[in-house]
Image (cartoon, rainbow, N blue to C red):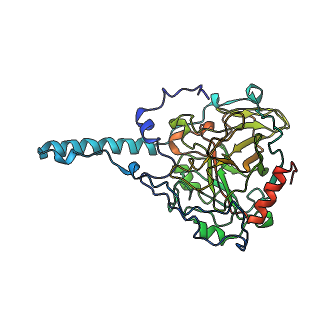
């Protein structure tokens, strides 16, 4: 994307630390692919039934610590000196990671007219042009917490920023496939999927939420703003028909640490209602009568086997710029979250929640999803998309 702010201003220690995702160092990815009861009665023999017990993502190489040979040093004094130096460096890096970076700044806000035109691929004859919307509300019940069970399982405040949730009513840092399948939902037609994203705040207003103290410690201040609308839309692929998502498929979009990781996985799209332009590195200043819009598009090329992977990306990828899925993958319905907000059209007035060291950089926008649609509802979505209907 070509970051206009550049990475030169980021401390080198931050660059080392931020190579991780939201998960704490060494956190294991737990696969519970077919352990939970299916949200429907299980009588469906759909060819896309989730046969994910054969996950191959156990990469032991990632656990190598690269310190072989350090214990062979016969000079105990040198060993102690080296160990102390390593510990000091690790402590400094940890302090840098937890330090709150000031932001955003006024340069992060630009008129939407400066954005690029929205890219829309031409749908070919063999493509799928329909859509399916899961009606899940706007988080009227104020289900929110600073957790992320996908990338930081079993951790409270693993995200260090607040997430809004729609869909599954039980989602928190300790959620599992089993607990989600047993919970209720805000979505229509029994869709128990969990959909979540970082909250937006008006920064000069008081935070009256239950997490205000922790949020302030993490550098997230201001009143949390509920979306005025939240569309959970599933779209087709311009090059092919789509197949059903497997139950318990997990997917993430964007990079919550793109401010220090770089833009390789950044997917932020900021716009305004009624406008045909998007920004990827800035917050939009919308014209009168228009609302701030976040467009969060998820990967939609599934490997046909796994519901998750070690980095939460390898099992489901994005198509290329023309909509073509990579070899060895097949197109599934593409989730596109469309969130709109009533926010002041003023620089510095609002910001998205972020990790402490990310300074509320708009490029860090991201979202998470786990599919728990009943199979008959997923079949309905696929049929609508492939037949060109809007459901």
The residue at the point 78 percent across, 65 percent down is: 376
**Quadrant in the picture for residue 279:** top right
Residue 156 shown left or right of residue 61 in the figure: right
- The count of marks equals 0
Position of residue 22 measured from the top left corner of the image (x, y, whole percent): 52, 49
Depth check: give the residue in front, 323 or 371.
323
Q: Can residue 99 be seen?
A: yes
Position of residue 261 measured from the top left corner of the image (x, y, whole percent): 51, 37
Q: Is residue 232 above or below residue 105?
A: below
Depth check: give the residue in front, 330 or 279.
330
Q: Outermost residue toward the right?
A: 389
Depth check: give the residue in front, 122 or 269.
122
Instruction: Name the quarter where the N terminus is drawn.
Output: top right
Instruction: Name the quarter where the C terminus is drawn.
Output: bottom right
Depth check: give the residue in front, 179 or 275.
179
Position of residue 2 measured from the top left corner of the image (x, y, whole percent): 60, 26
Residue 7 shown left or right of residue 276 in the figure: left
Residue 138 shown left or right of residue 313 in the figure: right
Q: Can residue 134 be seen?
A: no
Q: Is residue 7 above or below residue 253?
A: above
**Quadrant in the picture for residue 321:** top right
The residue at the point 75 percent across, 47 percent down is: 339
């Amino acid at each position: 994307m070509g970051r206009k702010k550049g990475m030169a201003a980021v401390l080198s220690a931050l660059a080392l630390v931020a190579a991780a995702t939201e998960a704490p160092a060494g956190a294991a990815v737990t696969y519970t692919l077919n352990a939970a009861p299916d949200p429907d009665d299980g009588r469906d023999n759909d060819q896309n039934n989730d046969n994910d017990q054969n996950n191959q993502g156990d990469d032991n190489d990632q656990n190598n610590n690269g310190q072989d040979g350090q214990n062979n040093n016969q000079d105990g004094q040198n060993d102690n000196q080296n160990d102390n130096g390593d510990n000091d460096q690790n402590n400094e890096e940890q302090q840098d990671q937890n330090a709150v970076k000031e932001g955003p700044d006024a340069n992060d806000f630009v008129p939407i007219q400066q954005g690029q035109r929205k890219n829309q691929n031409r749908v070919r004859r063999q493509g799928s042009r329909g859509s399916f919307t899961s009606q899940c509300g706007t988080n009227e019940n104020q289900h929110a917490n600073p957790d992320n069970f996908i990338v930081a399982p079993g951790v409270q405040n693993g995200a260090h920023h607040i997430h809004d949730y729609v869909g599954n009513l039980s989602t928190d840092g300790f959620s599992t496939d089993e607990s989600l399948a047993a919970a209720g939902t805000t979505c229509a037609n029994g869709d128990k999927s969990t959909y979540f994203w970082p909250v937006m705040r008006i920064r000069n207003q008081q935070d009256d939420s239950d997490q205000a103290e922790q949020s302030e410690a993490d550098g997230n201040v201001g009143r949390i703003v509920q979306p005025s609308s939240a569309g959970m839309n599933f779209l087709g692929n311009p090059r092919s028909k789509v197949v059903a998502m497997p139950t318990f498929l997990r997917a993430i979009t964007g990079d919550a640490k793109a401010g220090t990781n770089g833009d390789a996985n950044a997917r932020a799209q900021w716009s305004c209602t009624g406008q045909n332009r998007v920004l990827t590195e800035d917050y939009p200043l919308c014209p009168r009568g228009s609302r701030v819009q976040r467009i969060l598009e998820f990967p939609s090329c599934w490997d046909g086997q796994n519901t998750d992977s070690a980095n939460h990306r390898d099992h489901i990828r994005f198509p290329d710029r023309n909509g073509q899925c990579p070899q060895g993958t097949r197109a599934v319905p593409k989730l596109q979250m469309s969130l709109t907000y009533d926010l002041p059209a003023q620089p510095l007035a609002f910001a998205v929640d972020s990790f402490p060291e990310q300074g509320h950089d708009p490029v860090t926008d991201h979202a998470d999803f786990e599919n728990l649609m009943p199979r008959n509802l997923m079949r309905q979505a696929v049929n609508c998309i492939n037949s060109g209907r809007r459901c």
